[in-house]
Amino acid sequence: MAVVAVWKCDRDGKMFDDKKAAEAHDKMLELAANITQLIENSVEGISEAHSEAIGLLLAERSDQLAKACKGKPEVLLEGTEDQSANVTPLASNQ
Amino acid sequence: MAVVAVWKCDRDGKMFDDKKAAEAHDKMLELAANITQLIENSVEGISEAHSEAIGLLLAERSDQLAKACKGKPEVLLEGTEDQSANVTPLASNQ
């Protein structure tokens, strides 16, 4: 047996075996926090629960969101309309 | 006097002298509508007024949002904290 490095994301305490995955997770949460902050600065009467859920929703889809911002808004709705149905994950997202 | 072409954005009826500006406005509203739709599909109990305000808020900042999604989340909050203060617009945004 030996000691092994594991990586903890400070923001939510999530643990990772892989440093890159931990950093990506941390970056995602930073994006989520900033989207939430922007919403709270700008949208009157929004609840914290809603603004946090939206920050996370969008940050988790940052690749799609970046494409949507670059002239392909339709990618944002791909695969969301029947999320509860029997959807096979795209290989490119794995 | 002569007739001149003006361009109307179907989505909100806004008029433009310049076709490119009209198309950019239409694209922005399409992005806003899709962000709103994604939020409404995914966030329980959000009001239509809030989801529409957030879609527009983010779509109006699509350049910053794209950069934020590409590893620079801090750009999302640049200039928002003291919007009411005496802020000089960046030349690069003009």
Image (cartoon, coloured by chain):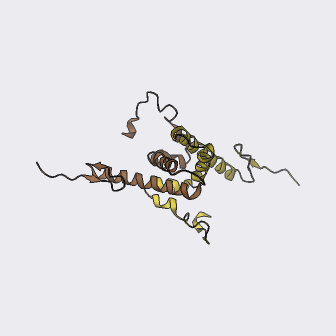
Chain colours: A brown, B yellow
If the image is split into quadrants, where does the N terminus of chain B sit?
bottom right
Can you give x and y, in whole percent of width and height, for residue A84 in the image? 46, 30
In terms of depth relative to the viewer, which is nearer, B24 or B14?
B14
In terms of depth relative to the viewer, which is nearer, B20 or B82?
B82
In terms of depth relative to the viewer, which is nearer, B36 or B3?
B36
Residue placed furthest toward the right: B1
- What residue appears at the point 68 percent right and 53 percent down from the top-left corner? B21
**Left or right of residue A79: residue B32:** right
- What residue appears at the point 70 percent right and 50 percent down from the top-left corner? B19
In terms of depth relative to the viewer, which is nearer, A81 or A14?
A14
**Left or right of residue B28: residue A6:** left
**Left or right of residue A13: residue A73:** right
* Image-quadrant location for residue A88: top left
Can you give x and y, in whole percent of width and height, for residue B61 in the image? 57, 55
Q: Is residue B23 visible?
A: yes
Residue placed furthest toward the top: A86
* Image-quadrant location for residue B91: bottom right
Q: Is residue B70 visible?
A: no
Can you give x and y, in whole percent of width and height, for residue B86 in the image? 62, 72
- Residue A81, compared with residue B1, is above or below; it is above
- What residue appears at the point 55 percent right and 54 percent down from the top-left corner? A39
Counting the numbered discs, the total is 0
Can you give x and y, in whole percent of width and height, for residue A78 in the image? 51, 36
* Image-quadrant location for residue B40: top right
If the image is split into quadrants, where does the C terminus of chain B sit?
bottom right
